[in-house]
Structure formats: C-alpha cells, structure tokens
C-alpha cells in the first residue's frame, strides 16, 4: 500500500503531540496505513470489512514500522483513544483502529488541485533545440540539476531532491 498520499492539516502544528515525537510518528504511520477504500478480510471464518480510515494492525506491527516499543505504542494508542482521535477494537491477535473524522481530512473530494506554473513546467521540459546548438546534446551540471531534481510545491516553494 505504498501508492498515494495523505493530507496533513496545519492545525497539527498546534497539537500537543507536536512536542512528543513518538506520538507524532505513530500518528502519521496510522494515517499512512489506514485504508482509503473498502477492504475485506477473513477472520475466524467470517468476512470482515474495513471502511476508509480504518486499519488492521497489531502492537507488534506498529513496533516494527516505527521502532517504538510495544508498551509505549499501547500508551500512545490509549492517549489517542482518550482524545477521541481513534477508536479501537482489539482481539488477542490483532486490532482494528478507526481514525475518527477521517472523512473530514482525507476524502478524495477535498484533494487539493495543484497548478504548475509555466516556469515549473519549463524546468521539466527537455529543450532539444537548445542542446543541438551546443553540439552533441551536452548539458551542464546545473541544467541537469534543474531538469531532474527541482520541483515546485503547491505553495510555490522550490523543493530539491537527492
């Protein structure tokens, strides 16, 4: 389930968990692991359905994903539940976590529309005419850097990747 993306609301910056890195780390993993559409699985011979915003997981799995100890994960999940950020259905083998208000923040209808500026589009355009004038399609390091590694975010910030 490594395709796609999630949205993070800016009000997260004002949340107390911003000062607790393990809480924030686990919260983001829960958002990333939650289903975005209905998913079915079989448990004890019965078909079960996960709705968008739910995930089937365990403390052990969350520990492997985050590197956070299982006891700490349990404590953080209890905190999220007390703060009404999640609901938990637990068994001795797994748990189903429901992220409350998932639809308010993650629905497809609210996905942002990203407009690319003409300048950003030009950065990704390979200009054969210009390179033919230089000779045998030689490009400088700076043009390769701009062409392959520079992106413009939705907020107009330039982002460089490795």
Image (cartoon, grey):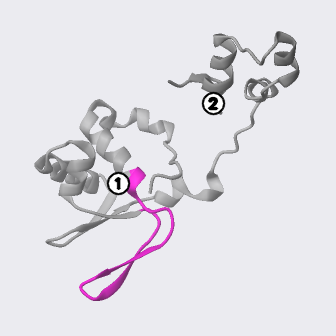
Task: Check disc 1: other Cα within 10 Å, few if <14, some if 14-19, many if 20+.
Answer: some
Q: CA distance from mark 2 to mark 1?
A: 29 Å
- Splitting the image into 4 quarters, where does residue 141 fall? top right
51 in the magenta segment:
yes
Looking at the image, do the residues carrying marks 2 and 1 touch, with CB atoms under 8 Å apart? no
Identify the disc placed on residue 160. Answer: none
- Give the camera-side residue of 133 and 70: 133
Q: Residue at x 33, y 58 (%)?
A: 86
Asked which quadrant contains residue 157, the reply is top right
Q: Quadrant of the N terminus?
A: bottom left
Residue furthest to the left: 71
Residue at 52% across / 60% down in the picture?
Answer: 103
Residue 125 in the image: x percent, y percent?
78, 28
Q: Secondary structure at mark 1?
A: loop
Look at 19% across and 57% down and name the residue there.
59
Number of labelled discs?
2
Mark earlier in primary sequence (2, 1)? 1
Instruction: Give the residue pinned by disc 2.
Output: 153
Image height of 139 relative to 27, above or below: above
Q: Is 161 left, or right, of 14 in this rendering?
A: right
Q: What residue sits right under mark 1 in the picture?
A: 85
For label 2, the crowd category at 10 Å Cα-Cα, with few meaning under 14, some 14 to 19 and many 20 or more, is few
Q: Position of residue 138 (x, y in %)?
A: 73, 14
Q: Position of residue 112 (x, y in %)?
A: 65, 45
- Relative to 27, residue 159 above or below: above
Which segment did they paint magenta? Answer: 31-53
- Asked if residue 132 lies left or right of residue 57, the reply is right
Q: Residue 25: x percent and y percent?
A: 31, 40
């Amino acid at each position: 389930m490594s395709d796609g993306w999630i949205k993070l609301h800016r009000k997260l910056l004002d949340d107390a968990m911003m000062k607790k890195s393990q809480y924030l780390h686990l919260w983001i993993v829960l958002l990333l692991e939650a289903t975005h559409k209905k998913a079915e699985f079989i448990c004890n011979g019965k078909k079960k359905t996960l709705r968008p915003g739910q995930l089937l997981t365990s403390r052990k799995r969350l520990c492997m994903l985050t590197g956070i100890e299982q006891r700490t994960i349990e404590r953080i999940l209890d905190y999220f539940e007390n703060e009404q950020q999640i609901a938990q259905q637990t068994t001795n083998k797994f748990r189903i976590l429901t992220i409350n208000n998932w639809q308010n923040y993650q629905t497809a209808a609210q996905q942002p529309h990203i407009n690319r500026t003409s300048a950003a589009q030009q950065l990704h355009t390979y200009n054969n005419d210009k390179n033919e004038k230089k000779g045998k399609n030689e490009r400088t390091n700076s043009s390769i850097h701009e062409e392959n590694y520079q992106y413009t975010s939705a907020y107009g910030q330039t982002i460089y990747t490795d």
